[in-house]
Image (cartoon, rainbow, N blue to C red):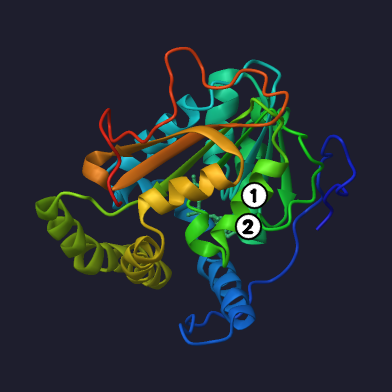
């Protein structure tokens, strides 16, 4: 990894990402915290190592085309200006980074801990000189960003918190690198709050997703099985209301949650607080939890 030091005011281009995937292994619920944290990280690395090749298309297909729509909603929540600097954490193959550049003409630093997924992002940039001119790839960990305090105007992260050992600490670390008044926005899967839709969702994630994944590859079948456990496990530990509390505790103000696609996805966004908060909530916005216009449920 060749990432800028924590003292750098502005990130620089990273060289090729390196590092092989660690061995996969189940996270033992009874294990000591340090062991759980190591296993969770090793598992995330191993899980994504074989996926980048067809990631974009398969992710869209397995979510019935909803995943790109959720990503667009995430990017719309950022409201960046041309030339502003946005950090996209857990960028994977760089789909959010691409959407940010195309929508706002901003500069994006795209960070991920998976060398393999960054390889997919690198292939994207090789095909698109306009994106390569505005996107810088960095291999790094969300828990320890190799970036200076307040170095970014805004920050996005996607499908991240299920993979980290301490979501509260990770959120604080993400907020640290955003300047006061900057937007922070995330996208994550969720469990539909409506019992009927939840039952259908369970059926799909537990049976349909692994089966459809198997039609693609052994690795996607394993990913399908993993998601069927990982999403409800996360919300059992961190119901949506609790996640929103963690955002506020990390110094993020005016926090909204928008459930999408009957609750299968959730976009959360807020504004980095601070003494010199440049804007606070934007016009017409007040802090609160929203479920496509209503109150957020428990995810
Ligand atoms: C489901 S993919 C999401 C990729 C992409 N953002 C998208 O829109 O689909 C999750 C990504 O999070 C990355 N990731 C997981 N834990 C991470 C961590 N602690 N630090 C940095 N990246 C992480 C994985 O390597 C993977 O590329």
Q: Residue at x 36, y 43 (%)?
A: 266
Position of 183 compared to 187: left or right? right
Q: Report the disc number at residue 85.
A: none
Q: Nearer the viewer, residue 62 or 261?
A: 261
* Farthest front residue in view: 275
Q: Nearer the viewer, residue 194 or 94?
A: 194
**Where is residue 93 drawn, in percent x and y?**
56, 47
**Within the image, what quadrant is residue 107 found in?**
top right
* Farthest left residue in view: 196
**Where is residue 153 drawn, in percent x and y?**
69, 27
Task: Write down the residue under mark 1.
Answer: 172
**Where is residue 245 drawn, in percent x and y?**
47, 48
Q: Is residue 71 positioned above or below 232 on the image? A: above
**Within the image, what quadrant is residue 252 found in?**
top right
Q: Report the disc number at residue 169.
A: 2
Label 1, ligand 1: CB separation under 8 Å = no
Q: Residue at x 40, y 67 (%)?
A: 223
Label 2 neighbour load within 10 Å: few <14, some 14-19, many 20+: some
Real-space CA distance between mark 1 and mark 2, rounded to the nearest whole angstrom: 5 Å
Tell me the element at label 1.
Answer: helix
> Ligand 1 sits in which quadrant?
bottom right
Res 204 seen here: yes
Q: Residue at x 32, y 64 (%)?
A: 232
Res 189 seen here: no
Position of 190 compared to 159: left or right? left
Tell me the element at label 2.
Answer: helix
Q: Nearer the viewer, residue 58 or 196?
A: 196
Q: Is residue 72 positioned above or below 159 on the image? A: above
Q: Is residue 60 positioned above or below 16 on the image? A: above
From the image, which quarter does the N terminus lie in?
bottom right
**Where is residue 231 drawn, in percent x and y?**
36, 62
Disc 1 vs disc 2: Cβ atoms closer than 8 Å?
A: yes
């Amino acid at each position: 990894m060749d990432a800028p030091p924590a003292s750098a005011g502005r990130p620089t281009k990273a060289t090729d990402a390196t590092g092989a995937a660690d061995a996969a292994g189940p996270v033992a619920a009874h294990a000591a915290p340090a062991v759980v944290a190591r296993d969770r990280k090793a598992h995330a690395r191993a899980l994504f190592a074989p996926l980048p090749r067809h990631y974009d298309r398969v992710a869209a297909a397995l979510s019935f085309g909803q995943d790109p729509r959720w990503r667009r909603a995430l990017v719309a929540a950022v409201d960046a200006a041309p030339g502003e600097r946005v950090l996209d954490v857990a960028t994977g193959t760089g789909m959010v980074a691409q959407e940010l550049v195309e929508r706002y003409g901003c500069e994006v630093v795209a960070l991920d801990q998976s060398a393999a997924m960054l390889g997919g992002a690198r292939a994207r940039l090789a095909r698109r000189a306009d994106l390569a001119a505005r996107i810088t790839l960095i291999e790094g960990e969300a828990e320890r960003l190799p970036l200076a305090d307040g170095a970014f105007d805004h920050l996005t992260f996607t499908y991240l918190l299920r993979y980290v050992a301490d979501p509260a600490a990770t959120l604080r670390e993400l907020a640290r690198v955003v300047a006061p008044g900057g937007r922070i926005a995330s996208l994550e899967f969720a469990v539909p709050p409506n019992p009927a839709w939840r039952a259908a969702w369970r059926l799909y994630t537990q049976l349909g997703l692994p089966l459809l994944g198997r039609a693609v590859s052994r690795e996607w079948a394993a990913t399908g099985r993993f998601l069927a456990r990982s999403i409800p496990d996360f919300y059992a530990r961190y119901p949506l209301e609790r996640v929103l509390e963690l955002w506020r505790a990390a110094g993020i103000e005016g926090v909204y949650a928008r459930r999408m696609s009957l609750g299968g996805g959730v976009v959360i966004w807020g504004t980095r607080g601070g003494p010199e908060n440049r804007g606070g909530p934007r016009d017409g916005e007040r802090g609160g939890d929203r479920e496509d216009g209503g109150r957020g449920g428990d995810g």
